[in-house]
Image: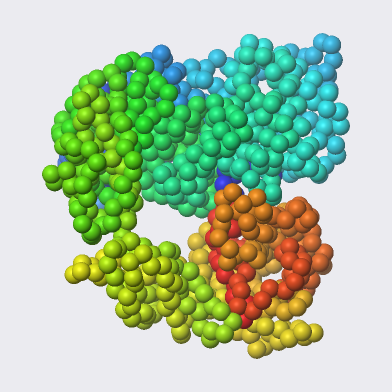
Amino acid sequence: MKDTPLFLPGRRLTLALALALLAPTVRAADAPPSLAFSSTAKGNIFTDAQGIVTLKVPSSVASGTLTVKNESGAVIETRPLGGDSGEVSITLPQKGFYALDAEAVQADGAKSRGATTAAVVGPAPSDEMRLQSHLGLWTVQGDADLVLAAGARWNRRMISIHKLGENMLSENPPAAESVLFPKSPFTQVGVMSFGLPLWLMEPTDKKKSFGNPLNKPTDWNKLKALVSAWVRQQGENFPDYFEIYNEPEWQWKGASNEDLVRVLATIADGIKEASPKTQVLGPGFSSIRIKDPARLDLVTAKGQGLFDHLDGLVVHAYVDGSAPEKEFIQRVEELQEFLRDIGRPKFPIHITEFGWTSGKGTWQKPVDEITQARYVVRSLTLLAALGVENATYFCLQFKAAPNPGERGFSLVHDDSTPKPGFAAYANVARWLAGVKGTGTWLRLTPTTHLVLFEKSDNTSIAVAWDTDAERVIGLPLVTSRREDMMGRALPASDTLALSPAPIFLEFSQAQSPTIEMLARLDVMRGGEDLALPRGGEWIAPTPLAVHDGRLSVPASAANGDYLLLTRDGQKWLGQPVKVIPPLEARPPVLAWSADQPEPSLETTVISHSTVPVTTRLAVKLDGTRDRFLEASEIAPGETRRLSVPLDGLSQGTRYRGKMAVDSRHEGRRDEISLPLDFTILSAAPVPRGKQPDWSQIPAVDFSGWDPFGGPIAPEDCSATLQAAHGTEGLHLRVVVRDDEHLQTRSGEDIWSQDAIQIGLDPDHQKTWEANDLFGLKGHRVFEYGVAWNGRQPMTWRWVSYVPELPVGVAEPRIRLSVKREGDLTTYDILFPWAVMGLDRPMAAGSAIGISLSLADADTGKTSRRALRLYGGIAEGKDPEKYGPLWLR
């Protein structure tokens, strides 16, 4: 497969994975360690109530220690070791994750060590229950027996038809050389990738990596006939579910989205013609992309009729390392809303790739292994609660990954021993097997979640956790069984001890509790107690409290949503409560009007109090002095904008800290803490008819702002930026110090070597409006590239939210001059206002949204590195992360 623009989510299917999927893996034999662990279970994964791991201790050992820990590092057992220990049998007494470590000193003083991991996951669910599950786990390079041990229903099988010959269209096509879809214990989803046969496509550049490009066929009828013939060739083995194509928007080499949609629709029709029973799924995008003019999106695909050829929708759902309760599940909810809006509310959703990595070195921000395990459980639980048909986690094992970050998505190590995420997956798969319909997702506090399910075996269950910290809540429901995230039994109790690691509950009744929701109450924290509209013994999550039917919300309560519960006969009443502060403060923003010598931080405050509130602002930034706005009085119901001057700060420095909004009324005090993360950057004015005098404009060194791939040594690569603006447009000068300038690519591929990707948003100061059909949420957003191959400068436009400025082309109106002297490369760039969709210059005092990602490539190095100034490019395309460039 072809490389794609810098660090986009979902791009793990590199040449290494392509070859791994289609060929056996050969491993070099490792010398056995002096302290060797072994067991009778594959990967030390035991599908029983207990397990036994054996440690072989050489007779040369003088002394040593065996330590067994759980996933949190808590010690379960220690034993002394000696030369007479021989084979030590270690019993793993219950379900859970185990880390085993042996250290020894030989008689000659030499030290040795052996380590492994193990998991006891309990018996696999019955096929009757497992095959009702929403959960999947893609094997990739792992052992399918371990996917079965995990309790997954769904699996994925990637294939290619790019080697099929034209003889497939003859009256007597050849028999299949191999069975691509052997009988499987899983509900298998087939997926096509790696291009089409060259004889069938319009000419295109042959890729250097595995497979062929994906382009428009020379004959549409032949494409459909070829797909049908191939499906018939596979016969009864062809799967009941099939994704048209894996992430087609990144493999597409054709001229238009219309042609890509037609290719996908034609493949779908060819499959259905030969195998009417197969549920054909599409479009297979790398992310939940509802609207995106840079690539084919769901709105466009629907408008061009693709959905009429599909039986269900399939997408991938990666996020950049954030928790499942945030962007991840919000995007899925937006996808469901989109399907409702287009009249397909029951269209099945298949999410066949998503996950979190525990390794550094890829596009996704890594998490540690215990966090990965927690996210596995929470994401799968939420997807099941929303009724997603197929939630297939990526992945069991990806040994051939090109870097530790890609490999870190795996739930087992290279030797197939488990990470905590495998044990967590196996436990949630057992609990969620056989759930019926959707779940009931209750948000008990802004961070506390309780999800209720009913199951086909006449049981009802719940999964509960707190995303932030340990919390104890009352739950007077009779439970027949409780387990922690790893499957260890928990004692019965009238309370729930919650943490970021979910716990599981089974109720004694067949139906989950029926809850009638009352109208939401908005309550000011630290205010007067409020009478609840219904009586009863209310259960209130801490720190909220109910006494004699009145709700008390202390000033310490976090703002956000809570849920109170009480019994009402055979059912429960739920009272949603939204806690609001006496003085609400909006997220602070930078402001820098043309007549101000320095920028300021502004916030808008809104009083919810019935009496005047005295407020004071404090800005606390790392590495600099605190700044204050002295106390002022805010009237009841008043909305006011407050501003704190930011004098003496350096341009180009990334400042982090907080804004504290302190409010006081009637002897009570409330404080809101708002996080700060900003950079000050300006563009100097250029008189009409003149060019920038760069000697008078300070250069901003952004080498250390936040480089992608970790710190980059200054002698290896560093860069400065200068900016100016005038009637001609926006002038940028970027000076790069780089020991080697490497650029042999062209067109859309220039990003992969020494080049600069530049995001621009002339509407940066506007709000982002989700339903605004102009641009992207009301913004004209662009991503341009500039590069130099030693002979000529090159430009490219990857992203545009203005139809008159198409993507996938060079932009000749950009004036680009590049020179290299020694190890310095200087880029002088002029962006005319027209290439930002503007018909006149922007005014002084306004701000352009900007982001820079400067790639650093060196001969022989495959890792991706980039210097960055602001976000939104290198870590995933998100223009809301661009920062302001103030026009002075």
Q: Quadrant of residue 685?
A: bottom right
| Left or right, 588 with reference to 299 | left
Q: Is residue 602 above or below residue 385?
A: below
Q: Is residue 239 above or below residue 732?
A: above
The answer to whether residue 196 is seen in the rendering is yes
In this rendered view, identify the residue nearer to me: 109 or 482.
Answer: 482
In this rendered view, identify the residue nearer to me: 777 or 759.
Answer: 777
Spot occupied by residue 239 in the image (x, y as percentages of width and height) = 60, 18
Residue sitting at the far bottom: 696
Q: Is residue 13 above or below residue 280?
A: below
Which residue is at 20% across, 69% downward?
A: 666
Which residue is at 34% across, 23% downward?
A: 454
Spot occupied by residue 682 in the image (x, y as percentages of width and height) = 59, 78
| Left or right, 148 with reference to 164 | left
The answer to whether residue 84 is seen in the rendering is no
Color encoding of the figure: rainbow
Spot occupied by residue 581 in the image (x, y as percentages of width and height) = 31, 60
| Left or right, 800 with reference to 284 | right
State the quadrant of the N terminus. top right
In this rendered view, identify the residue nearer to me: 730 or 22.
Answer: 730
Spot occupied by residue 840 in the image (x, y as percentages of width and height) = 75, 71
Q: Quadrant of residue 567?
A: top left
Which residue is at 42% across, 78% downward?
A: 644
Number of numbered discs on residues: 0
In this rendered view, identify the residue nearer to me: 644 or 647.
Answer: 644
State the quadrant of the C terminus. bottom right
Residue sitting at the far left: 548
Which residue is at 52% across, 20% downward?
A: 187
